[in-house]
Amino acid sequence: MRASPRLTQAASLGLMWGLAAATIGVLAFIIIYILAHGLPHVTWGFLTESPRSMGREGGVLPMIVGTAWVAGLAVVIAAPVGVATAIYLTEYTREGRLTAVIRFGADCLAGIPSIIFGLFGFVFFVITLGMGLSIVSGALTLAVMVLPTIIRTSEEAIRAVPQAYRDVSFGLGSTRWQMVTQVVLRSALPGIGTGIVLSIGRSISETAAVMLTAGSALGLPRTAFDSSRTLALHFYTLSREGISMPNAYATASVLILAILAVNLSAYWLMRRLAAGGR
Amino acid sequence: MRKEKVIAGVLAALALTAISALAVIASFIFKEGLPIIAKVGLAEFIFSGNWHPLDGEFGILPMIVGSLAVTAGAMVIGVVFGLGCAVLLTQFCPPRIVSVIKPSIELLAGIPSVVYGFMGVAILVPLIREHLGGPGLSVLASSVVLGVMVLPTVTSISVDALQAVPRAYFEGSVALGATVWQTTHMVTLRAARSGIVAAVILGMGRAVGETMAVIMVAGNTLDLPHSILDPVRTLTSNIALEMGYAAGDHRKALFATAVVLLAIIMVLNSIALAVSRRLPAGRQAGRAAKAAAR
């Protein structure tokens, strides 16, 4: 006997709502669990002190500074290159062999696991170029890693700019570069910003690649050539080696709050993008 | 006009950064890894189960099996949940609820892998140990954790694929008297098939490549697993665990592990590309899949 179509529909709908609810439930559980265990330990002192006795006591100031350095520098390096690539692909060339090669490179790069970026950064930046385990090595490695994201989001944002804007700009006698900088980029800015913000998020949460390139020094980094442990790696070390669970939870809370802030700003930018398009 | 030419040249040079970086990465990994594969012998390296790097024995079979096992398990969970969410989001969900579920799934993609690993150790591993037996650190635990981690990839690419199906297919089917669900599984899902396959394969790539979360929940033993409750070590964990102290041939063998990992990823990505190019309805989805950079 065949079940009636309406019944099958109701059953499968119920199943899918269940799956979606479970997914959201997992997300909510992770965030609430970490924050509930960690936030009570996130005091002013925790945020402004250096760790003592391997992180058993004290705070995470050097890790916050190190994470900001590594993620910030990575994006400062990757953003101009990524946006330039997107501009080149959309405004300066026709689809052909060259664009196919460029896209192939970006697509492949996007699929490479972070541990391989870490290995590469280790032999190339740390050893071959002699930068040592340092913020610069970590940032350069992450820059290569987030480059495809920035290229893709920027390209989408630039393509979404109506052709009429370009025609008008040319009609008023502007050169191509003037058209790009004063018209196209201006209106694609929220979209490009979204990509950059998401890349910052990815850099903050990355662990495997920075472990092999930025090292795990506990001190406050003074220059970009110092080694520095990021928040994610500090959390990993604290929890895995069982150094201090309260501090591990507190570090994870700081990390989660940073990610939440990043995602909220990306979301806000995307909303602005949608509003601007209307 | 001269200035314009210079600008075009500079942009072209910068645009070649990605492909050059790829070439440099591949050449460095291969340069470090290939000699030891040649020395040990490819068959020995891939099919031997003896990994005693300090005695010069390099066989990564258990790690290959481990990677494949946790990936297969992860895909069961990632595909069921990811595709379920994608179908719900594109076919049934009122826009107001889409605007809650979609950002949540994006946020799920943003959570650091160490946090996933930690939650696995804190919640999942004890549950498995108490209720199913074994050490808890296992293929099963890794599969669940990885499944949640690849879910956003599978969902977002499947959503693109499903949205690329022409609206007329849906309307035609419903006009013939089919219910929305019948239309979904008989028409829409079929039309989006290639994009969905690409989503699944790219999700696999994500799962194979994940490192930190797996290290924390997989147990990292060097034995071949006999059941899903056994601990395993994956290719990625092998690299991350031993890189800190490896030297000489040992270090080269870790790069060789990366060569094998890279080969697996390349095969998966090529399949994803080939599949997503095949069907016209999947073309747009295929582009989205190709560009699935996150």
Image (cartoon, helix red, strand yellow):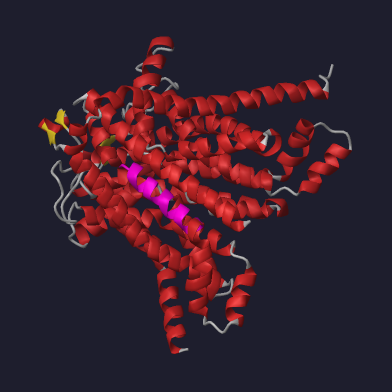
Q: Nearer the viewer, residue A168 or B265?
A: A168
The tally of labels here is 0
Toward the right, the furthest residue is: B176
Q: Residue at x 77, y 47 (%)?
A: B167
Decide: is A18 above or below B147.
above
Question: Looking at the rendering, which quadrant does residue A229 occupy?
Answer: top left
Residue A118: image x %, image y %? 30, 49
**In the shown orientation, is residue B97 left or right of residue A106?**
right
Q: Nearer the viewer, residue B252 or B161?
A: B161
Residue drawn at (70%, 33%) of the image:
B92
Which sits in the foreground, A24 or A191?
Answer: A191
Residue A219 in view, yes or no: yes
Most common SS among magenta residues: helix
In this picture, which residue range is highlighted in magenta? A191-207
Q: Please provide percent x and percent y for residue B242.
A: 24, 39
Question: Which residue is painted at 56% across and 84% down in the image?
Answer: A173
When the figure is inspected, residue A108 is found, relative to residue A168, above or below; the finding is above
In the rendered image, the residue lying farthest to the bottom is B2
The answer to whether any part of residue B32 appears in the image is no
Q: Is residue B122 left or right of residue A130?
A: right
Question: Residue A239 falls in which quadrant of the image?
Answer: top left
Where residue A221 appears, x then y in whole percent? 15, 49
Residue B65, image x and y in percent?
A: 42, 34
> Does residue A200 show up magenta in the picture?
yes
Q: Is residue B45 magenta?
A: no
Q: Is residue B38 above or below residue B79?
A: below
Residue farthest to the top?
B131
